[in-house]
Amino acid sequence: MTTEWERVDDYIAAHLLGGDPALDAALAANAAGGLPAIDVSAPQGKMLHLLARMCGARRILEVGTLGGYSTIWLARALPEDGRLVTLELEPHHAEVARSNIARAGLAARVDVRVGPAIESLEAMIAAREMSFDLVFIDADKPSNTAYLKAALALTRPGSTIIVDNVVREGGILEANSGDERIEGTRALFEAVAAEPRLSATAVQTVGAKKWDGFLLAVVRA
Ligand code: SAH
Ligand code: DHB
Ligand code: MG
């Protein structure tokens, strides 16, 4: 059944997003490859793209690639010499993503790194990789606080940090829910609240991906 929220997302996409063969092909390849349909929605992807443009992002870090759907939206915001590094645990997801990203013409700008994100992030910090202008965190939710800490080490004052799925149909209101994804997200809110280096909010969303939300933060000067 198509919900009203989905129909509104379709209306928004039809008016403001237009046809997008590369993204349609990515979603088809994800489904064919058996990947779960937990990518951001099309209007959300465009929002990430616009946020990256608003920050003038030249270097973007993504944690949680899946099939590269959000990666493509974000990488399209980069200038020709920009760079997006995306971290993915599952080799099969990374393989599907690389093919989707190549089909979108973005292979030269995107680096898909396979392995537990926390290890990739620690290696990046140790290697003193250049700072990122925007970080999008969208992987395993229990690690959200660890990803936030790593993001702070890999950004500069003025950088933007965005976290997906921070509302979970209101699930974040449940203390001791027993759902480690909710507990991880509640821990993230505590960590952001206690972090003087961040100015943050969270915005609830409804749509094809149901009731959820994004946490948005800027690293303070
Ligand atoms: N950002 C994507 C969706 C990501 S879904 C989009 O919107 O299109 C979450 C992804 O995080 C999955 O592909 C999952 O395999 C990956 N993931 C889970 N645990 C991880 C870990 N420890 N390190 C890196 N990636 C992980
Ligand atoms: C889940 C993860 C996501 O990144 C998402 O957008 C939706 C659901 C999950 O783990 O359930
Ligand atoms: Mg998500």
Image (cartoon, rainbow, N blue to C red):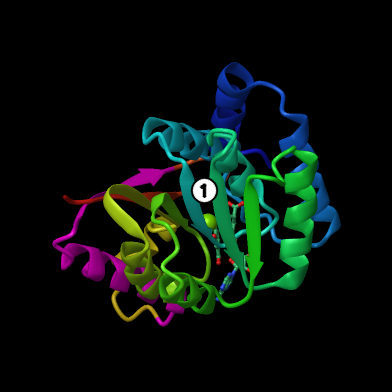
In the displayed structure, 100 sits above or below 115; it is: above
- Give the quadrant of residue 145: bottom left
Q: Is residue 74 above or below residue 151?
A: above
Residue at image point 78% right, 31% down: 21
Residue drawn where x is 40% and y is 34% of the image = 56
Residue 191 magenta: yes
| Dot 1 amino acid type | Lys
Q: Nearer the viewer, residue 177 or 118?
A: 118
Where's residue 136, x and y in %? 46, 54
Q: Indicate whether 46 appears above or below 196.
A: above
User: What segment carries the magenta color?
Assistant: 178-205
Q: Is residue 209 left or right of residue 146?
A: right
Give how far across and how far down residue 46 sits, in percent. Answer: 53, 33
- In the figure, residue 150 lies in which quadrant? bottom left
Residue 207: % across, % down: 52, 40
Q: Is residue 105 left or right of residue 165?
A: right
Whether residue 191 is visible to the viewer of this picture, yes or no, is yes
Viewport quadrant of the N terminus: top right
Q: Residue drawn 24% across and 70% down?
A: 191
Q: Secondary structure at mark 1?
A: loop
* Left or right: where 110 falls relative to 166: right
Q: x and y percent of residue 72 in the render?
A: 64, 42
Which is nearer the eye, 161 or 130?
130
Residue underneath mark 1: 210
Circle 1 packing at 10 Å, graded few (<14), some (14-19), many (20+), is some
Q: Is-magenta flag for residue 88?
A: no
Residue name at image x 80 percent, y 62 percent: 34
